[in-house]
Image (cartoon, rainbow, N blue to C red):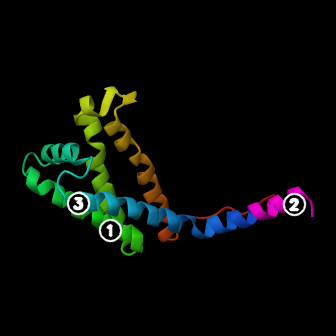
Amino acid sequence: MTFLEKFEKIESNVLDWMALHGIVLLRISIGIIFFWFGFQKFFPGISSAEDIATKTIDVMSFGIVKAPYSMPILATWETLIGIGFITGKYLRPTVLLLYMQMIGTLFPLFVFPGETFYLAPFVPTIEGQYIIKNIIIITAAMVILSHNQGKIISRSKTS
């Protein structure tokens, strides 16, 4: 067996493993992120997103949800999303919660451009970068739910 054939065999085995486990690991990793960041929000002053999240919730709720309640609500929401993704239970409502949460997450890009961009919309601040990267989570949730519902069709090898 040549070096290239050995390499292709190893590559094939790795790709098979990735195909078998990749989406589950993606789901669990998103769950860990949501649980980790959500749990922090139960403790005032710990989360780096606390200020902008509190302001966003105030604006989105038209001042109905006051600051002392906004972080515990968000903490509970995000922690539930995390648990849902980690366990894989109730994925449809979990993804719905995630998408609803993402509306709030992306909201500051439009209502607080001074805090999310140095030069809108081209040069984001660290807060803006933190928000924009959520595009990955949104699309990953699409893949995870589609896979969970049996809607992802893999293409066959043609080589």
**Residue at the (17%, 54%) spot, across then down:** 44
Q: Amino acid at mark 1?
A: Pro
* Residue 93, numbered circle: 1
Q: Is residue 151 visible?
A: no
* Residue 75, numbered circle: 3
For residue 104, side relative to residue 87 (left or right): left
| CA gap, disc 3 and disc 1 | 17 Å
* Callout 1 secondary element: helix
* Callout 2 secondary element: helix
For residue 7, side relative to residue 86 (left or right): right
The magenta stretch is 1-11
Label 2 sits on residue: 5
Q: Are marks 3 and 2 in contact (CB under 8 Å)?
A: no
Furthest residue to the right?
1
Return the residue nearer the eye: 152 or 84: 84
Furthest residue to the front?
46
Which of the two discs, 3 and 2, labels the residue nearer the N terminus? 2
Question: Would you identify the image quadrant in which residue 130 lies?
Answer: top left
**Residue at the (22%, 42%) spot, across then down:** 52
Q: Amino acid at mark 2?
A: Glu
Q: Is residue 63 visible?
A: yes
Which of the two discs, 3 and 1, labels the residue nearer the N terminus? 3
* Residue 2, numbered circle: none
For residue 32, side relative to residue 60 (left or right): right
- The image shows a total of numbered marks equal to 3
Q: Position of residue 74 (x, y in %)?
A: 21, 57
| CA gap, disc 2 and disc 1 | 46 Å
**Which class describes the residues within 10 Å of circle 1: few (<14), some (14-19), or many (20+)?**
few
